[in-house]
Image (cartoon, rainbow, N blue to C red):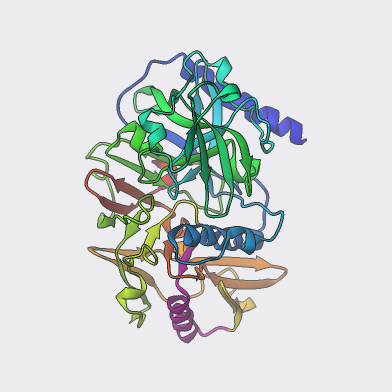
Amino acid sequence: MMKMHKLALLLALLAAALAVSCSDAAGGAIRAPLTRADAGRGLTRRQLLRRMARRSKARAARLLSASGSSPASASAVLGKGQVIDTEYLVSFVVGTPPQPVQATLDTGSDLVWTQCQPCPSCYAQALPYYDPNLSATSAPLPCDAAACQQLDLSSCGARKWGNRTCVYTYSYGDRSVTTGRLDADTFTFDGDAGHAAVPGLAFGCGYFNNGLFSSNATGSGIAGFGRGALSLPSQLRVDNFSYCFTNVTGSTPSPILLGLPTSLYDSASGAVQTTRLIQSPANPTFYYLSLKSITVGSARLPAPESAFALRGNGSGGTIIDSGTSVTLLPPLVYGLLHDAFVSQVDLPVTNDEPLCFAVSSSSSGKKQQVPKLELQFDGATLDLPRENYVFEIEDGGQSNMCIAIMSSGGGMTIIGNYQQQNLHVLYDLAGNNLSFVPAHCDTV
Protein backbone atom coordinates (compact mmCIF):
# COMPACT_ATOMS: atom_id res chain seq x y z
CA MET A 1 0.00 0.00 0.00
CA MET A 2 2.86 2.37 0.88
CA LYS A 3 4.56 1.64 -2.48
CA MET A 4 1.34 2.43 -4.35
CA HIS A 5 1.01 5.73 -2.38
CA LYS A 6 4.59 6.71 -3.27
CA LEU A 7 4.04 5.78 -6.92
CA ALA A 8 0.86 7.87 -7.09
CA LEU A 9 2.66 10.84 -5.51
CA LEU A 10 5.57 10.55 -7.93
CA LEU A 11 3.30 10.27 -10.99
CA ALA A 12 1.29 13.32 -9.92
CA LEU A 13 4.38 15.46 -9.37
CA LEU A 14 6.03 14.28 -12.59
CA ALA A 15 2.86 15.11 -14.52
CA ALA A 16 3.02 18.61 -13.11
CA ALA A 17 6.70 18.80 -13.98
CA LEU A 18 6.05 17.77 -17.59
CA ALA A 19 3.36 20.43 -17.87
CA VAL A 20 5.83 22.98 -16.55
CA SER A 21 8.56 21.94 -18.96
CA CYS A 22 6.26 22.64 -21.91
CA SER A 23 5.49 26.18 -20.78
CA ASP A 24 7.33 29.46 -21.15
CA ALA A 25 8.40 31.54 -18.18
CA ALA A 26 5.73 34.03 -17.22
CA GLY A 27 5.71 37.29 -15.34
CA GLY A 28 3.48 38.21 -12.45
CA ALA A 29 3.16 36.51 -9.10
CA ILE A 30 4.78 33.13 -8.52
CA ARG A 31 2.55 30.55 -6.86
CA ALA A 32 3.33 27.26 -5.15
CA PRO A 33 1.04 24.81 -3.30
CA LEU A 34 1.54 24.05 0.39
CA THR A 35 0.55 20.66 1.79
CA ARG A 36 0.14 20.20 5.53
CA ALA A 37 2.16 17.27 6.85
CA ASP A 38 -0.78 15.77 8.79
CA ALA A 39 -3.24 16.01 5.88
CA GLY A 40 -4.77 12.72 4.83
CA ARG A 41 -3.39 10.67 7.73
CA GLY A 42 -6.76 9.92 9.28
CA LEU A 43 -5.78 11.32 12.66
CA THR A 44 -8.35 12.05 15.35
CA ARG A 45 -8.66 15.59 16.65
CA ARG A 46 -7.05 14.52 19.93
CA GLN A 47 -4.10 13.08 17.98
CA LEU A 48 -3.86 16.24 15.90
CA LEU A 49 -3.71 18.45 18.99
CA ARG A 50 -1.07 16.27 20.63
CA ARG A 51 1.07 16.35 17.50
CA MET A 52 0.65 20.10 17.15
CA ALA A 53 1.68 20.60 20.78
CA ARG A 54 4.69 18.30 20.44
CA ARG A 55 5.88 19.94 17.23
CA SER A 56 5.43 23.41 18.67
CA LYS A 57 7.53 22.62 21.74
CA ALA A 58 10.30 21.14 19.60
CA ARG A 59 10.19 24.06 17.19
CA ALA A 60 10.34 26.52 20.08
CA ALA A 61 13.41 24.77 21.48
CA ARG A 62 15.11 25.11 18.11
CA LEU A 63 14.22 28.79 17.66
CA LEU A 64 15.05 29.67 21.26
CA SER A 65 18.41 27.97 20.93
CA ALA A 66 19.15 29.83 17.69
CA SER A 67 18.19 33.20 19.22
CA GLY A 68 20.03 32.67 22.50
CA SER A 69 16.79 32.80 24.50
CA SER A 70 17.12 29.28 25.93
CA PRO A 71 19.71 26.51 26.16
CA ALA A 72 17.12 23.81 25.43
CA SER A 73 17.34 21.71 22.27
CA ALA A 74 14.63 20.10 20.17
CA SER A 75 16.26 16.71 20.59
CA ALA A 76 15.95 17.08 24.37
CA VAL A 77 12.26 17.96 24.02
CA LEU A 78 11.48 15.07 21.67
CA GLY A 79 13.68 12.38 23.11
CA LYS A 80 16.34 10.27 21.46
CA GLY A 81 15.62 8.84 18.02
CA GLN A 82 12.50 10.89 17.32
CA VAL A 83 11.95 13.26 14.40
CA ILE A 84 10.01 16.46 13.99
CA ASP A 85 7.10 16.36 11.60
CA THR A 86 7.00 19.63 9.72
CA GLU A 87 4.00 21.89 9.25
CA TYR A 88 3.90 22.62 5.51
CA LEU A 89 5.65 21.21 2.45
CA VAL A 90 6.05 23.46 -0.61
CA SER A 91 6.18 21.86 -4.07
CA PHE A 92 8.22 23.03 -7.08
CA VAL A 93 10.55 21.54 -9.70
CA VAL A 94 14.28 21.95 -10.26
CA GLY A 95 16.42 21.40 -13.36
CA THR A 96 16.10 20.80 -17.10
CA PRO A 97 14.25 18.51 -17.59
CA PRO A 98 12.48 19.29 -14.31
CA GLN A 99 12.76 17.06 -11.25
CA PRO A 100 10.06 17.35 -8.54
CA VAL A 101 10.94 18.61 -5.06
CA GLN A 102 8.84 18.88 -1.89
CA ALA A 103 10.58 20.90 0.81
CA THR A 104 9.66 22.21 4.25
CA LEU A 105 8.47 25.82 4.20
CA ASP A 106 10.62 27.55 6.82
CA THR A 107 10.43 31.29 7.56
CA GLY A 108 13.01 30.67 10.30
CA SER A 109 15.97 29.76 8.04
CA ASP A 110 17.54 30.94 4.77
CA LEU A 111 19.18 28.15 2.80
CA VAL A 112 17.18 26.26 0.18
CA TRP A 113 18.42 22.67 -0.10
CA THR A 114 17.35 19.27 -1.33
CA GLN A 115 18.87 15.81 -1.07
CA CYS A 116 21.03 14.96 -4.07
CA GLN A 117 22.51 11.99 -5.86
CA PRO A 118 24.86 10.46 -4.96
CA CYS A 119 23.55 10.44 -1.39
CA PRO A 120 26.09 8.79 0.95
CA SER A 121 24.18 9.79 4.10
CA CYS A 122 20.55 10.68 3.38
CA TYR A 123 17.19 9.85 4.89
CA ALA A 124 14.59 7.96 2.84
CA GLN A 125 12.15 10.11 0.85
CA ALA A 126 9.12 9.36 -1.34
CA LEU A 127 10.47 11.24 -4.37
CA PRO A 128 13.68 10.36 -6.23
CA TYR A 129 16.73 12.29 -5.06
CA TYR A 130 17.53 15.25 -7.28
CA ASP A 131 20.34 14.29 -9.69
CA PRO A 132 22.42 17.23 -10.95
CA ASN A 133 23.89 15.03 -13.68
CA LEU A 134 20.44 14.70 -15.27
CA SER A 135 19.94 18.47 -15.50
CA ALA A 136 21.33 20.40 -18.47
CA THR A 137 21.12 23.66 -16.49
CA SER A 138 22.82 22.48 -13.27
CA ALA A 139 26.17 24.00 -12.35
CA PRO A 140 28.29 23.81 -9.18
CA LEU A 141 29.13 27.23 -7.75
CA PRO A 142 32.78 28.13 -7.07
CA CYS A 143 33.92 28.92 -3.56
CA ASP A 144 34.46 32.59 -4.46
CA ALA A 145 30.85 32.99 -5.70
CA ALA A 146 28.79 35.67 -3.94
CA ALA A 147 26.26 33.07 -2.77
CA CYS A 148 29.01 30.99 -1.17
CA GLN A 149 30.22 34.03 0.74
CA GLN A 150 26.77 34.34 2.35
CA LEU A 151 27.16 31.02 4.15
CA ASP A 152 28.29 30.96 7.77
CA LEU A 153 30.32 27.81 7.15
CA SER A 154 31.78 26.90 3.76
CA SER A 155 35.02 25.69 2.20
CA CYS A 156 36.68 25.13 -1.16
CA GLY A 157 36.10 21.61 -2.39
CA ALA A 158 38.60 19.31 -4.04
CA ARG A 159 38.67 15.80 -5.42
CA LYS A 160 35.20 14.26 -5.09
CA TRP A 161 33.58 17.68 -4.52
CA GLY A 162 35.06 19.18 -7.67
CA ASN A 163 37.99 21.58 -7.78
CA ARG A 164 37.30 24.86 -5.94
CA THR A 165 33.58 24.21 -5.67
CA CYS A 166 31.61 25.68 -2.75
CA VAL A 167 31.12 23.07 -0.03
CA TYR A 168 28.62 24.12 2.64
CA THR A 169 27.60 23.00 6.12
CA TYR A 170 24.31 24.40 7.40
CA SER A 171 23.05 23.61 10.88
CA TYR A 172 19.76 24.17 12.70
CA GLY A 173 18.95 24.89 16.33
CA ASP A 174 17.90 21.25 16.84
CA ARG A 175 21.46 20.22 15.84
CA SER A 176 20.35 18.78 12.52
CA VAL A 177 22.97 19.38 9.82
CA THR A 178 23.06 19.29 6.04
CA THR A 179 26.40 19.20 4.22
CA GLY A 180 26.87 19.26 0.48
CA ARG A 181 27.75 21.34 -2.55
CA LEU A 182 26.24 24.71 -3.38
CA ASP A 183 24.82 24.49 -6.90
CA ALA A 184 22.75 26.67 -9.20
CA ASP A 185 19.89 25.49 -11.39
CA THR A 186 16.56 26.53 -12.87
CA PHE A 187 13.58 26.50 -10.50
CA THR A 188 10.11 26.38 -12.03
CA PHE A 189 6.89 27.47 -10.30
CA ASP A 190 3.32 28.23 -11.23
CA GLY A 191 2.72 31.84 -12.30
CA ASP A 192 -0.22 34.17 -12.88
CA ALA A 193 -0.02 33.63 -16.63
CA GLY A 194 1.37 30.12 -16.84
CA HIS A 195 4.60 28.74 -15.43
CA ALA A 196 7.60 30.76 -14.29
CA ALA A 197 11.08 29.34 -14.86
CA VAL A 198 13.81 31.16 -12.93
CA PRO A 199 17.39 30.25 -13.91
CA GLY A 200 20.49 30.31 -11.75
CA LEU A 201 19.03 30.01 -8.24
CA ALA A 202 21.57 28.90 -5.64
CA PHE A 203 20.66 25.91 -3.46
CA GLY A 204 22.30 23.24 -1.39
CA CYS A 205 22.78 19.85 -3.00
CA GLY A 206 22.68 17.88 0.24
CA TYR A 207 24.85 14.76 0.33
CA PHE A 208 25.11 14.31 4.11
CA ASN A 209 21.85 15.13 5.92
CA ASN A 210 21.75 14.08 9.55
CA GLY A 211 19.67 14.84 12.64
CA LEU A 212 15.92 15.18 13.05
CA PHE A 213 15.19 14.97 9.34
CA SER A 214 12.80 12.44 7.80
CA SER A 215 10.72 12.18 4.63
CA ASN A 216 7.46 12.93 6.45
CA ALA A 217 9.14 15.67 8.45
CA THR A 218 11.25 17.39 5.83
CA GLY A 219 10.17 16.15 2.40
CA SER A 220 13.12 16.41 0.02
CA GLY A 221 14.77 19.22 2.00
CA ILE A 222 14.06 22.70 3.36
CA ALA A 223 12.99 25.87 1.54
CA GLY A 224 14.31 28.81 3.53
CA PHE A 225 11.98 31.83 3.45
CA GLY A 226 13.89 33.91 6.01
CA ARG A 227 15.32 37.41 5.61
CA GLY A 228 18.83 36.33 4.52
CA ALA A 229 20.37 36.61 1.05
CA LEU A 230 20.11 32.88 0.27
CA SER A 231 16.39 32.55 1.01
CA LEU A 232 13.98 31.92 -1.83
CA PRO A 233 12.28 35.36 -1.64
CA SER A 234 15.67 37.11 -1.59
CA GLN A 235 17.02 35.20 -4.56
CA LEU A 236 13.82 35.77 -6.54
CA ARG A 237 14.25 39.50 -5.77
CA VAL A 238 10.59 39.92 -4.98
CA ASP A 239 9.26 42.84 -2.97
CA ASN A 240 6.90 40.61 -1.02
CA PHE A 241 5.45 37.18 -0.46
CA SER A 242 2.26 35.92 1.16
CA TYR A 243 0.56 32.78 2.31
CA CYS A 244 -3.00 31.92 3.25
CA PHE A 245 -3.32 28.85 5.48
CA THR A 246 -6.51 26.82 5.04
CA ASN A 247 -8.08 25.06 8.04
CA VAL A 248 -5.29 23.09 9.70
CA THR A 249 -7.65 20.20 10.49
CA GLY A 250 -8.57 19.81 6.81
CA SER A 251 -6.71 18.58 3.73
CA THR A 252 -7.19 21.50 1.29
CA PRO A 253 -3.80 22.77 0.06
CA SER A 254 -2.76 26.30 1.00
CA PRO A 255 -1.23 28.79 -1.45
CA ILE A 256 2.04 30.67 -1.10
CA LEU A 257 2.65 33.54 -3.51
CA LEU A 258 5.76 35.61 -4.25
CA GLY A 259 5.92 38.98 -5.99
CA LEU A 260 2.31 40.11 -5.61
CA PRO A 261 0.80 43.29 -7.06
CA THR A 262 0.05 46.30 -4.88
CA SER A 263 -3.67 45.68 -5.51
CA LEU A 264 -3.54 42.41 -3.54
CA TYR A 265 -6.04 43.53 -0.91
CA ASP A 266 -8.36 45.56 -3.16
CA SER A 267 -11.09 42.91 -2.96
CA ALA A 268 -10.58 42.11 0.73
CA SER A 269 -13.84 41.85 2.67
CA GLY A 270 -12.34 42.84 6.02
CA ALA A 271 -10.12 45.58 7.38
CA VAL A 272 -6.47 45.23 6.44
CA GLN A 273 -4.19 45.43 9.49
CA THR A 274 -0.54 46.43 9.09
CA THR A 275 2.32 46.40 11.57
CA ARG A 276 6.02 46.95 11.10
CA LEU A 277 8.61 44.21 10.84
CA ILE A 278 11.56 44.56 13.18
CA GLN A 279 15.08 43.50 12.23
CA SER A 280 17.53 42.01 14.69
CA PRO A 281 21.26 42.27 13.95
CA ALA A 282 21.81 39.26 16.21
CA ASN A 283 19.17 37.11 14.43
CA PRO A 284 18.74 38.63 10.96
CA THR A 285 16.78 35.67 9.56
CA PHE A 286 13.67 35.96 11.78
CA TYR A 287 10.58 38.11 11.14
CA TYR A 288 10.14 40.03 14.38
CA LEU A 289 6.99 41.97 15.26
CA SER A 290 6.25 44.59 17.90
CA LEU A 291 3.63 42.91 20.12
CA LYS A 292 2.39 45.30 22.80
CA SER A 293 -0.29 43.44 24.76
CA ILE A 294 -2.85 40.60 24.84
CA THR A 295 -6.50 40.88 25.81
CA VAL A 296 -8.68 37.98 27.02
CA GLY A 297 -12.35 38.94 27.09
CA SER A 298 -12.36 42.53 28.29
CA ALA A 299 -9.25 42.15 30.47
CA ARG A 300 -5.82 43.13 29.22
CA LEU A 301 -3.18 40.78 30.63
CA PRO A 302 -1.03 42.58 33.23
CA ALA A 303 2.18 41.77 31.35
CA PRO A 304 4.67 44.58 30.64
CA GLU A 305 5.54 45.36 27.02
CA SER A 306 9.08 44.30 27.85
CA ALA A 307 7.81 40.70 28.13
CA PHE A 308 7.33 40.68 24.33
CA ALA A 309 10.23 42.96 23.37
CA LEU A 310 13.41 42.11 21.52
CA ARG A 311 16.45 42.66 23.71
CA GLY A 312 19.75 44.15 22.68
CA ASN A 313 21.54 40.79 22.88
CA GLY A 314 19.06 39.23 20.43
CA SER A 315 17.08 37.24 23.00
CA GLY A 316 13.35 37.58 23.61
CA GLY A 317 11.15 39.30 21.07
CA THR A 318 8.08 38.22 19.10
CA ILE A 319 8.33 36.43 15.75
CA ILE A 320 5.75 35.22 13.27
CA ASP A 321 6.56 31.71 12.08
CA SER A 322 5.21 29.31 9.46
CA GLY A 323 6.72 26.26 11.14
CA THR A 324 5.17 26.50 14.61
CA SER A 325 1.68 25.03 15.07
CA VAL A 326 0.30 27.01 18.00
CA THR A 327 1.25 30.38 19.43
CA LEU A 328 3.81 30.15 22.23
CA LEU A 329 4.23 32.71 25.00
CA PRO A 330 6.94 33.30 27.62
CA PRO A 331 6.08 31.31 30.79
CA LEU A 332 5.03 34.38 32.78
CA VAL A 333 2.68 35.59 30.03
CA TYR A 334 1.28 32.11 29.46
CA GLY A 335 0.49 31.86 33.16
CA LEU A 336 -1.44 35.13 33.01
CA LEU A 337 -3.36 34.00 29.91
CA HIS A 338 -4.11 30.63 31.52
CA ASP A 339 -5.47 32.28 34.65
CA ALA A 340 -7.54 34.79 32.63
CA PHE A 341 -9.32 32.00 30.74
CA VAL A 342 -9.83 29.92 33.90
CA SER A 343 -11.41 32.90 35.66
CA GLN A 344 -13.75 33.65 32.74
CA VAL A 345 -14.75 30.13 31.68
CA ASP A 346 -17.02 28.39 34.16
CA LEU A 347 -16.00 24.83 33.30
CA PRO A 348 -13.76 22.19 34.96
CA VAL A 349 -10.13 22.30 33.84
CA THR A 350 -8.91 18.96 32.46
CA ASN A 351 -5.42 19.99 31.30
CA ASP A 352 -3.11 22.90 32.05
CA GLU A 353 -0.99 23.04 28.87
CA PRO A 354 -2.59 23.37 26.50
CA LEU A 355 -5.40 24.58 28.72
CA CYS A 356 -8.48 22.37 28.26
CA PHE A 357 -11.96 22.48 29.78
CA ALA A 358 -14.49 19.67 30.12
CA VAL A 359 -17.71 20.45 28.26
CA SER A 360 -20.88 18.94 29.71
CA SER A 361 -22.81 16.37 27.70
CA SER A 362 -25.81 18.71 27.60
CA SER A 363 -23.67 21.21 25.69
CA SER A 364 -22.32 18.63 23.26
CA GLY A 365 -22.81 19.75 19.66
CA LYS A 366 -23.18 23.38 20.72
CA LYS A 367 -20.42 25.95 20.70
CA GLN A 368 -19.43 26.78 24.25
CA GLN A 369 -19.12 30.47 25.02
CA VAL A 370 -15.49 31.53 25.27
CA PRO A 371 -13.86 34.92 25.92
CA LYS A 372 -12.53 36.68 22.83
CA LEU A 373 -8.77 36.85 22.29
CA GLU A 374 -6.90 39.81 20.80
CA LEU A 375 -3.23 40.43 20.13
CA GLN A 376 -2.34 44.13 20.03
CA PHE A 377 0.63 44.96 17.81
CA ASP A 378 2.19 48.31 16.98
CA GLY A 379 -0.47 49.79 14.66
CA ALA A 380 -2.54 46.61 14.27
CA THR A 381 -4.90 44.35 16.22
CA LEU A 382 -5.33 40.66 15.52
CA ASP A 383 -8.88 39.91 16.71
CA LEU A 384 -8.79 36.15 16.53
CA PRO A 385 -11.91 34.31 15.41
CA ARG A 386 -12.94 31.50 17.73
CA GLU A 387 -11.65 28.76 15.41
CA ASN A 388 -8.16 30.31 15.48
CA TYR A 389 -7.57 29.70 19.16
CA VAL A 390 -10.17 27.16 20.33
CA PHE A 391 -9.61 23.49 19.52
CA GLU A 392 -12.55 21.22 20.30
CA ILE A 393 -12.26 17.50 20.92
CA GLU A 394 -14.97 14.86 21.21
CA ASP A 395 -13.49 11.53 22.14
CA GLY A 396 -15.06 8.52 23.82
CA GLY A 397 -18.13 10.44 24.90
CA GLN A 398 -16.03 13.15 26.54
CA SER A 399 -15.98 16.66 25.08
CA ASN A 400 -13.13 19.09 25.70
CA MET A 401 -12.55 22.67 24.66
CA CYS A 402 -8.85 23.56 24.48
CA ILE A 403 -7.06 26.88 24.05
CA ALA A 404 -4.44 26.32 21.34
CA ILE A 405 -1.72 28.40 23.00
CA MET A 406 1.20 27.16 25.09
CA SER A 407 4.35 28.27 26.90
CA SER A 408 7.50 28.69 24.81
CA GLY A 409 9.65 27.69 27.75
CA GLY A 410 11.85 30.75 27.22
CA GLY A 411 11.79 34.46 26.59
CA MET A 412 10.48 34.41 23.01
CA THR A 413 6.89 34.80 21.76
CA ILE A 414 6.09 32.85 18.58
CA ILE A 415 2.91 33.48 16.55
CA GLY A 416 1.95 30.05 15.23
CA ASN A 417 0.08 28.99 12.11
CA TYR A 418 -3.07 27.85 13.96
CA GLN A 419 -3.66 31.49 14.82
CA GLN A 420 -3.02 32.40 11.15
CA GLN A 421 -5.73 30.18 9.64
CA ASN A 422 -7.81 31.88 6.95
CA LEU A 423 -5.76 35.05 7.16
CA HIS A 424 -4.05 36.30 4.03
CA VAL A 425 -0.67 37.27 5.51
CA LEU A 426 1.58 39.53 3.44
CA TYR A 427 5.29 40.00 4.16
CA ASP A 428 6.10 43.38 2.58
CA LEU A 429 9.88 43.03 2.31
CA ALA A 430 10.38 46.33 0.50
CA GLY A 431 8.26 48.34 2.95
CA ASN A 432 9.35 46.29 6.00
CA ASN A 433 5.75 45.68 7.07
CA LEU A 434 3.50 42.72 7.74
CA SER A 435 -0.19 42.91 6.80
CA PHE A 436 -3.07 40.51 7.35
CA VAL A 437 -6.75 40.36 6.52
CA PRO A 438 -9.43 37.64 6.94
CA ALA A 439 -9.83 35.53 3.80
CA HIS A 440 -11.28 32.29 2.46
CA CYS A 441 -7.91 30.71 1.87
CA ASP A 442 -9.30 27.80 -0.16
CA THR A 443 -10.28 30.32 -2.88
CA VAL A 444 -7.13 32.49 -2.93
Number of numbered labels in the structure image: 0
**Residue 388, above or below 368:** above
Report the front residue among 325 and 271: 325
Where is residue 403? Give x, y as percent: 51, 71
Where is residue 245? Give x, y as percent: 45, 49
- The answer to whether residue 170 is left or right of residue 394 is left
Residue at (67, 58) in percent of width and height:
44
Res. 57 in view: yes
Give the farthest residue toward the right.
1
Report the front residue among 194 and 166: 166
Is most of the magenta stretch helix, strand or loop? helix
- Magenta stretch encompasses residue 152: no
Report the front residue among 85 and 9: 85
Res. 89 in view: no
Residue at (47, 31) in percent of width and height:
203
Quarter holding the C terminus?
A: top left
Where is residue 409? Give x, y as percent: 51, 70
Where is residue 227? Give x, y as percent: 35, 46
- The answer to whether residue 49 is left or right of residue 204 is right
* Residue interval drawn in magenta: 326-347
**Residue 160, above or below 365:** above
Report which quarter residue 350 is drawn in: bottom right
- The answer to whether residue 36 is left or right of residue 1 is left
Quarter holding the N terminus?
A: top right
- Magenta stretch encompasses residue 344: yes
